[in-house]
Each structure stands twice: as structure tokens, then as C-alpha cells.
Image: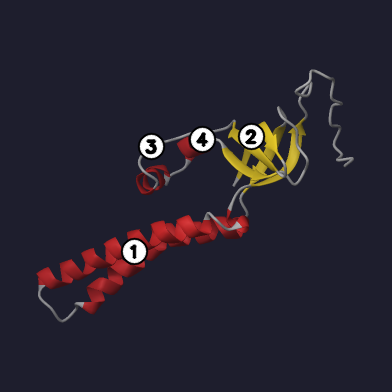
Amino acid sequence: MIRNGLVREVRGEEALICPTDGSECNSCEAKHACLSLSGGKERNTDFWIPNDLGASRGDLVELELRSSASLTIIASTFLLPVFLLFAGYLFMMNGTDLQRALGAGVGLVAGIVSAIVINKRLGTKKGYNMQMTKILKKADSDTDGNDVKELEGSNDD
């Protein structure tokens, strides 16, 4: 997943990013499932990420979530609850209809709780968060009002 963001603030080795393109949620087929697991509200929140490229306040940057991280998050969010639903059903296979339904329900609830816990833990790991991949446009001036050179396809750090 690739997004764009604006650097709002820089503190040490981290940058506060404001996403500028919140439209990818609108085009995603799984939008409602994600929103229901994340609290049901679509938010455009700022977040801190490592400033590996040395971006400055006001720079437009490209952010990326690695495909492997995205697939792990998708698997834990969607596949794990379904797997545990079937596991709960199969565990109670020799019971009555009500017992099988309860087993499936307990499996589903366990899967949803597990997905939330796993996603929160993955969110604390560096490889499972957005990372700055390039500076798309440098700010016209820095915080003191001095001119900043336009970035012309290279990083001369």
C-alpha cells in the first residue's frame, strides 16, 4: 500500500505525518470490515514514523506499507476469525445443533479478539508500519522562512 503524506513536524529522528490521500479507503472493497474492527470511524489521523530520509516540515513524502506486512495483517484480520469459526464448529461436531452453533460462535469471537490483539502487537513492530520511501516535493521554505532548494530527483544527504 502506497500513500502520500505531508510532514507536519520533525522531532529528532521521527516525523509527524498527515496523510493527504485518504481516498484509498473509499475504493477498497474491505472498507466496512476494517472500519468495524478499528472502531467504526473513518479517521484521517496524523502519525509518527522514522524520518529515514531527512524530510523537513512541509515536505510531501511517499509512504509505503510492505506487501508482506500487508498480507500478514490481512491474514490475521480476516482469515484467522474464519478459521477459528470453523474450528469451533468442528470441535463441537458431535453435539447438538445448538452446541455446534455455540462452538462456531465462540470460535468466531476468539478469532476476532485474537485478530485485534495480533494487529495491536504488529503495530508496535517497525516492519509492520508505514515507512517513508521518498520525498516527492520539498517545502518551498523551512520554518525560519529561508528558501529551501527544490528536490530534483536526488537525495544529497
Residue bearing mark 3: 41
The residue carrying mark 2 is 5
Amino acid type for the residue under numbered disc 4? Thr
Q: Is mark 2 on a helix, strand or loop?
A: strand
Residue at figure coordinates x 67%, y 39% from the top left: 15
Please name the amino acid that badge 3 sits on.
Answer: Lys
Residue name at image x 68 percent, y 39 percent: 62
Q: How far apart are marks 1 and 4 (CA)?
A: 27 Å
Q: Name the residue under label 4.
A: 45
Identify the mark at residue 111; answer none if there is no mark: 1
Secondary element under disc 1, as helix, strand or loop, is helix
Classed neighbour count for the residue bearing mark 1: other residues with Cα under 10 Å, few (<14), some (14–19), many (≥20): many
Between the residue at mark 3 and the residue at mark 2, the CA separation in whole angstroms equals 20 Å
State the residue in front, 121 or 20.
Answer: 121
Distance Cα–Cα, label 4 vs label 3:
11 Å
Q: Distance between the residues labelled 1 and 3?
A: 21 Å
Q: Name the residue: 39% across, 65% down.
A: 80
